[in-house]
Amino acid sequence: MNLKGRNFLTLKDFSPEEIAYLLDLAAALKAEKKQGKTGNRLRGKNIALIFEKTSTRTRCAFTVGCVDEGGHPEYLGSNDIQLGAKETIEDTARVLGRMFDGIEFRGFEHSKVEKLAQYAGVPVWNGLTDDYHPTQILADFLTIREVFGTLKGIHLVFIGDGRNNMANSLMIGSGKMGLHFTIIAPKALWPGQELVDLCRGYAAESGGSISITEDRDAVAGADAIYTDVWCSMGEESKAAERVALLSPYQVNEALMKKTGKESTIFMHCLPAVRGNEVTHEVLESPQSVVFDEAENRMHTIKAVMVATLGNEE
Ligand code: CP
Ligand code: NVA
């Protein structure tokens, strides 16, 4: 499999085989690291890390993943560079592309990361936009594979803000990889119909399925329950409205019991607001795999950099 030179903007652009390859590579890199081995696959590579929004996991995963493989990461926060304010994105992209070998971007409009990719001339990786968070999906799917040994046929339920970047990206990934994916959310927060139709097309190919409902009883039979913050970065002004809409959709012990399975795992991309989308008890329960997901951000992001930019595999 050769992904050299490819951008990583959304999983729409990747085939199921390519996604499986990235997960296999991440698992291999993780096994190496557990044996105390790191590599030189990014030796001589300079990586720009652009963050318009804050980050703990994504920033640290890119930094540690890059250094582990002998590369050099450079953090560029929103107050550090001109991106889109004093200088056009097209110009910044071409300048950074002359100096760096790869660029990570986290920010608001998805069109910005697309423009960067169009003009930079080097691989651009999406570290989260308002619409998508594709590197998170790789970490989540590696975690699901570690627990259940497979992705195909797994029943994954996302409950909460059903139209945010996580719901969108989980739906794309699930459609591609043959999971049975359910979004449980109030109608006002359902994902866009165009994206749902696209993902149903993927699911028809992979043997998966996509369903959207307001009914919390739809957690029955779930292998994994996933939630995310009710207000994503940039939506802070909607806090009161979201609490009112989403309080009935909190993941608590009663909801976990509704699955009818003791083996159901709890997932969250983090950061979490305990007492809102999830209770402290569920987050800290033995069913919670949230810190495995967080660790897997590093192994999977390293795999994306190595696959698209690495000297060897
Ligand atoms: N899950 C995630 O992307 O976390 P950060 O916002 O801390 O990067
Ligand atoms: N939906 C959240 C994800 C954070 C990792 C946000 O965009 O803030």
Image (cartoon, grey):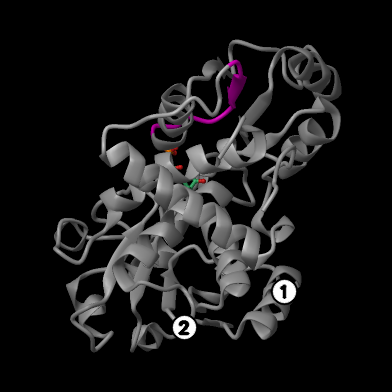
Q: Amino acid at mark 1?
A: Gln
242 or 266, which is in the foreground?
266
145 or 240, which is in the foreground?
145
Reading the image, the residue beneath label 2 is 153
Total marks in image: 2
Q: Amino acid at mark 2?
A: Gly
- Residue 227, image x, y percentages: 39, 62
Look at the numbered disc 1 and give the secondary structure of its residue.
Answer: helix
- On screen, residue 312 versus residue 192, left or right, reads left
Location of residue 56 (image quadrant):
top left
Q: Relative to residue 94, is residue 157 depicted above or below?
A: below
Look at the numbered disc 2 and give the secondary structure of its residue.
Answer: loop
Q: In the drawing, what numbered circle is on residue 82?
A: none
39 or 212, which is in the foreground?
39
**CA separation, marks 1 and 2?**
23 Å
- Residue 203, image x, y percentages: 64, 80
Location of residue 204 (image quadrant):
bottom right
Pointers 1 and 2 in contact (C-beta within 8 Å): no
Location of residue 45 (image quadrant):
top right
Indicate whether residue 46 is drawn in magenta.
Answer: yes
- Residue occupying the point 64% across, 51% down: 131
Q: In the drawing, what numbered circle is on residue 193?
A: 1
Q: Which residues are magenta?
A: 44-56
Q: Earlier along the polypeptide chain: callout 1 or callout 2?
A: 2
Residue closest to the far front:
312
- Residue 68, image x, y percentages: 41, 26
Disc 1 crowd, CA 10 A, few/some/many (<14, 14-19, 20+): few
- Residue 109, image x, y percentages: 70, 40
Disc 2 crowd, CA 10 A, few/some/many (<14, 14-19, 20+): some
- Split into 4 quadrants, where in the image is the C terminus? top right
